[in-house]
Amino acid sequence: MSAASGLRNAGSDAAAPAESSCPVSRGAAARVLRAWNIADLRRLAKKRLPRAIFDFFDGAAEDETTLADNRAAFERVRLAPKTLAGVARIDTSAAILGARSKLPIAVGPTGGIGFGWPFADVGVARAAATAGIPYTLSTMATASIERIAREAGGRLWFQAYIFRQRGMTLGLVERARQFGYEALMVTVDVPVGGKRERDFRNDFAIRFRFTPRNVLDFASRPGWVLSVLRHGMPRLENVADLAPEAKSTAEIASSVGQFWDADFDWDGLARMRDGWPRKMLVKGILRADEAERLAGLGIDAVVVSNHGGRQLDGAVAGLTALPPIVRAVKGRMSVLVDGGVRRGVDVVKALALGAEGVMLGRATLYGACAAGEAGAARALEILRDELVRSMQLSGVRSVGEIGPDLLAN
């Protein structure tokens, strides 16, 4: 059977397999253990995945200037470390959204990661639970709200996109409430989809079809192809009802963008706040005046974010937007930041600039694409070890000691 015909059959969205993990070969496990930083995990993911799949995760909008600036913003910040501080014992625990976390880190929502590794959503959620940090399930995940609640454990947040079919959004939110998710995260920076040109060039972002380009691309990664043939093409389990006429996951994925609700506004958000009984975060804020207004609405936390550079190219980096937002909310809400976090020292920099914690996107995603749950766990282990070392070298013994006095003038 050819790769093309096999993938056609695999993409028929048959019932999801009962298993919820994909075994990691000894070779893959050894390789991720030899990954010393997130960049190493990225290289392993790139080597394993077809270009179209890797670029879907790795790429961003248009010229990708905002993607680059997310990373550059961390590199521009310089620390003035303290010395003689007695740093033999380090406490990395922190309060994240009013509850204790073993690290000042949460895993952010990343859609479609089951295309990179079978059952990767469950694997990343389990890795987060083991690490003692919150995990956010994306609306566009390849695991359902119910599956993650049953099989992952830990602190679970649900990220909601706003669809024109408002009842669809509210139905997802209600399912998250029923299954005990502690917080709802509303993403507000996607009135329309960004122009992600890598996907266009790879024949990935249009209604999916097999072309000479992508068939050859897939055939160049036989390990990935065999995985798809064995486990089936993943399903976007939470949004399948949006495109009932679609015959495959790829068709659903290519159709979902037309369902975003570009008319969603402050009144709509206020109604969602009134209808959700637990903690609520709003993700995708880069303006201090909007963060201040959200605090007035009773929103519990804001995620300073430009969607990993995948929406408006030219938007300010999250880390750059962070300090004025922290000043504007004046402690009335939690402030998290994402975009470009690749090192443990990045966490120190974000906290010194006023964040309560950081959210990870591509960092754990690269690990998951390299070796599933083991790879995601390795990503978190790397960041934890780097955070501890960075705190010791900065002369701080606990997260609570990280403040603006660490910043170089």
Image (cartoon, helix red, strand yellow):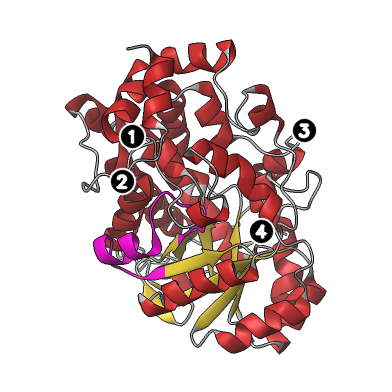
Gap between marks 1 and 4 measured at Cα: 33 Å
Q: Amino acid at mark 3?
A: Asp
Front residue of 87 and 171 = 171
Q: Is residue 306 visible?
A: no
Query: Could you tell me if residue 99 is visible in this image?
Result: yes
Q: Mark 1 or 3, which is nearer the eye?
A: 1
Q: Which residues are magenta?
A: 137-156
Q: Residues within 10 Å of mark 2 (few under 14, many from 20)?
A: some
Residue at image mark 1:
232
Residue 16's disc is 2
Label 3 with label 2: CB-CB less than 8 Å = no
Residue type at numbered disc 1? Gly
* Residue positioned 48% across, 85% down in the render: 278
Find disc 3 in the rendering and name its residue. Answer: 63
* Residue type at numbered disc 4: Ser
Looking at this view, is 84 or 383 the one in front?
383
